[in-house]
Image (spheres, helix red, strand yellow):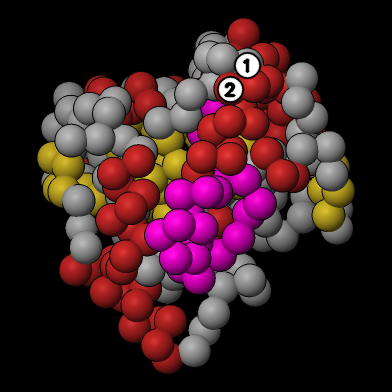
Amino acid sequence: MNARPIILAEGANHDLPSRIDRAAALWLRRHPMPVSLDRPVVSFTFDDVPDSAIINGARILEQQGCRGTFYLAGGLAGGTFGPYNFFVPSDVPYLLDRGHEVGCHTFSHPVVQTLDARRLAEEFDRNRQWLTAVDPRAEPVSFAYPYGAVGFSQKAQTARRFSNSRGVRHGLNTGKADRAQLLAVQLYDCRLDEKGLDEVIGEAVRSNAWLVFYTHDVQDGPSEHGCSPRLLSQAVERVLAAGCTVAPMREAMAIAGGAEKPH
């Protein structure tokens, strides 16, 4: 599977210094984690968590005996944006009670690359405080970068805070994966058809990789950043049929040989 370009939302900066900073973070500030698997592992993750990710996404996973990781930004709770109606506070204990993982997505969903150390720490602290105030069990160890944008200094700070951080660069995690910027595959109807789904699962099986899918809404007629219930169901069914282990990010880290806490 050939790596595709980093895909960033409109909120990220595309000027030359920002692009160089992101490239330096990607290639020069790696936090290697050997991935040693007897069988492939697949994680299903949901960013921002529109209500359909819970209503449909969590349900589809549970029907197959699987669980996922839901990256929450507390500042989005109860809000709306474009086609999205976001999660509400009561969804936090709901997800945890059902065995899903709640991850951190900052509090206000900024472009992490633009934040200095103090402001980034405030984002992490505020979201942790919000989550644990709703449910003390919601102590996040997994993180996903809003917009996928992270710079050289922010990546080091994130690695100290979380056991694993997921980006948006396309690929599978094999060999010495970067736990501070894990590769992922978009589970978007507009980008992944059945053939593409079979190809990425097949490569994960051949290489005993850790495959991380990510999406946003899960509904019929999804947004350009979401998937239909049909596509998610197909993905879950096919990875299980291929003999993959399905696990939330925190558990997948342990399976792959990583630690739940940063070194």
Whether residue 262 sits left or right of residue 10 in the image: it is left
Viewer-proximal residue among 217 and 112: 112
What label sits on residue 112 in the rendered view?
A: none
Viewer-proximal residue among 186 and 177: 177
Residue of label 2: 132
Q: Quadrant of the C terminus?
A: top left
Q: Is residue 59 above or below residue 45?
A: above
What is the quadrant of residue 76 in the picture?
Answer: top right
Query: Is residue 73 at all visible to an observer of this figure?
Result: yes
Q: Residue furthest top?
A: 97
Residue of label 1: 135
Q: Is residue 47 above or below residue 1?
A: above
CA distance separating discs 2 and 1: 5 Å
* Secondary element at image label 1: loop
Instruction: Specify few, some or many for label 2: CA neighbours under 10 Å numbering under 14, 14-19, or 20 or more.
Output: some
User: How far across and down, in percent of the image, does residue 89 sit?
Assistant: 75, 26
* Residue at 65% in and 74% down: 10
* Residue at 64% in and 21% down: 133
* Residue at 72% in and 44% down: 75
**Magenta stretch bounds:** 100-123
Whether residue 192 sits left or right of residue 90 in the image: it is left
* Secondary element at image label 2: helix
Marks 2 & 1, CB-CB < 8 Å contact: yes
Please name the amino acid that badge 1 sits on: Asp
User: How far across and down, in percent of the image, does residue 32 sit?
Assistant: 16, 48
Whether residue 151 sits left or right of residue 53 in the image: it is left
Viewer-proximal residue among 125 and 167: 125
Q: Is residue 113 magenta?
A: yes
